[in-house]
Image (cartoon, rainbow, N blue to C red):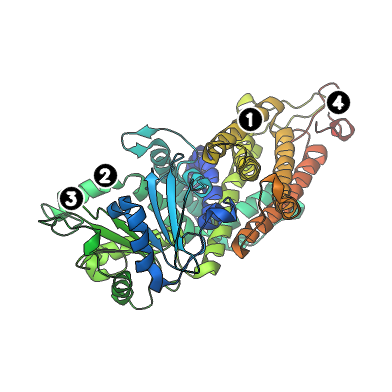
Amino acid sequence: MQIRSDILRIYQKVHLWTGITAGILLFICFFAGALTMFKPQLSAWASPPTSILPQIATAQADELLQQALELHPEIAKGFTLHLNDDKYAPLTWYSRGGGRGLNLNAEQWQATLDEHGQLLTQKVQPSQLGTLIDQLHRTAGIPGNLGHEQLGVLVMGVASILYFMALVSGVIFLLPTLVKTLFALRQKKGPSRFWLDSHNLLGITALPFHIVIAITVVVFAFHDVFYDALGEFVYGKTPGFSRGAPLVQPLNITHLPPIREIIATANQHAPGYEARTLTFMGLDTPRPAVRIEMYNEQALMRGPLADFLSLQPYSLETQFSTFSPTATGTWGRIVAVFFGLHFGSFGGMPGRWLYFFMGLSGAMLFYSGNLLWLEKRRQQQKGAELPQQPRKVRLMAAATVGCCLGAMVAVAITMLLGKWLYSWVTNINYSYLWSYYLCFTAAVLYSFWRGAARAAIHLLRIGALACIAMPLTSMLATYAPSLGIWAPHTLTTLMVDLVALLFAFGFLYSARLTQQRAVNGPADSIWAIIDKQNSATPASRLSVY
């Protein structure tokens, strides 16, 4: 395909500058997004087994609710039932905090029935590890609020617009050589060519995935603007979302139909779906609701883990549904499909693993893009003088290493410290927050101090040590339970340790390649380790410390 060279140069510049502007933020979001595919498993891994009361048969839910209500009348305002999910207690409600988002001070009550049918309750502080990683996914770790919206979400909305522009311009720029070079990984032509081929392959093969992510993030970030526009130009005076008429006379929890009847109504709403979680809200208000998470691994579900069905809990009338075209209309279903594609909530566990690897490949796409930009702008200097790269290139290299590798290392250390500090601190959730931001900041500062090449090697090694320490900690917990740490208690929590071990090998392998490049690669590269007291020969570049 022939495209004029001047047009190609324009698209190349658009691709470079939009990519480099948003690349670091997108790396953090994609890496954290890959981890959030297993958010419940991460939270369960970070919680001792004793903090989750055992499940009961669904038929016992009414008896459990009745006994809990007698001892804790505050349940009458709202509560959550978890059905056949060993990652949660059967009945939970919040005495403080709760709701969506990161709440470090949340306190939760749990309840179940013992083997004799007697009530068991306990107050816990739910782990926010999974929620913290999800916040990184949504905000890239940018703190603060702008109005009622998180600042990081709005920033990522802008970054995703640039991301979409980079995708389109990159495809156009590649069109003339797409067929010839798509699957060519030319290792023998040097690291730069190999990174370029890898970058192009990752971008083109996952292009539909990246387009969906870019568009949906823009919608997530600026949904208020879109909803206001729809209200003004589409719905007019008719509300876009209706929960039905409010009750003339508010009812209370004693008027609830049996739980089994609510579950049966929900399961009949759509064939193939199964009610997993029932959250009752506003039971003593004019607008009560029960939001039910409906699971069907064969469907393209609207939420991160399930579709949603909202019923009026007393009459069982449908208020809202994310999987019924007649309830939301054609446009509503299109939006639901896009959201499902963003969350990867289809295909069961294989689908989640697929999105996990696609999220990591997306992070690698942005990291490799920054490496290519840096290599393209290095100054090749000949002669005996040591090569001195431009200051802006050195700073960008340090920022890339510090932010990208720093985020990965900070998450690994935070997870590790969570187990060791659990018995020593009053609120482990604050430890998660402080640990991540302190480690991330230290990694960025270290990268600027020591330079990108040395910092990359050291951070990769630290990340490997932290990841190796996770399964070792679990092994130690098996033989020394008095330390206050705990071993994996389910298959899903064991998988967290196994994946950490795989990450450790990946970090070690990357550190080895990075050191080889630093010592044996081109001396005028930003990634070279140079002994400034001697000439730029390989023998004078052996030290990476």
- Residue at the location (46% across, 39% down)? 104
Image disc number at residue 535: 4
Which structural element holds mark 1?
helix
422 vs 264, left or right, is right
Dot placed on the residue nearer the N-terminal end, 3 or 1: 3
Q: From the image, tell me which residue sits under label 2.
A: 225
Q: Could you say where residue 542 lies in the image, as x and y percent from the top left?
A: 86, 34
Tag shown at residue 442: 1
> Which of disc 4 and disc 3 is earlier in sequence?
3
Task: Quickly name the residue at label 3.
Answer: 231
Mark 2 surroundings: few (<14), some (14-19) or many (≥20) residues within 10 A: few
**Which of the marked residues, 3 or 2, is nearer the chain's N terminus?**
2
| Residue depicted at x 64% and y 37% | 401
- Report if the CB atoms under discs 2 and 1 are less than 8 Å apart: no
In contact (CB < 8 Å): disc 3 and disc 4 = no
The CA distance from mark 3 to mark 2 is 10 Å
- The kind of secondary structure element at disc 3 is helix
Helix, strand or loop at disc 2?
Answer: helix
Q: Is residue 312 visible?
A: no
Instruction: State the CA–CA distance, disc 2 to disc 4.
Output: 59 Å
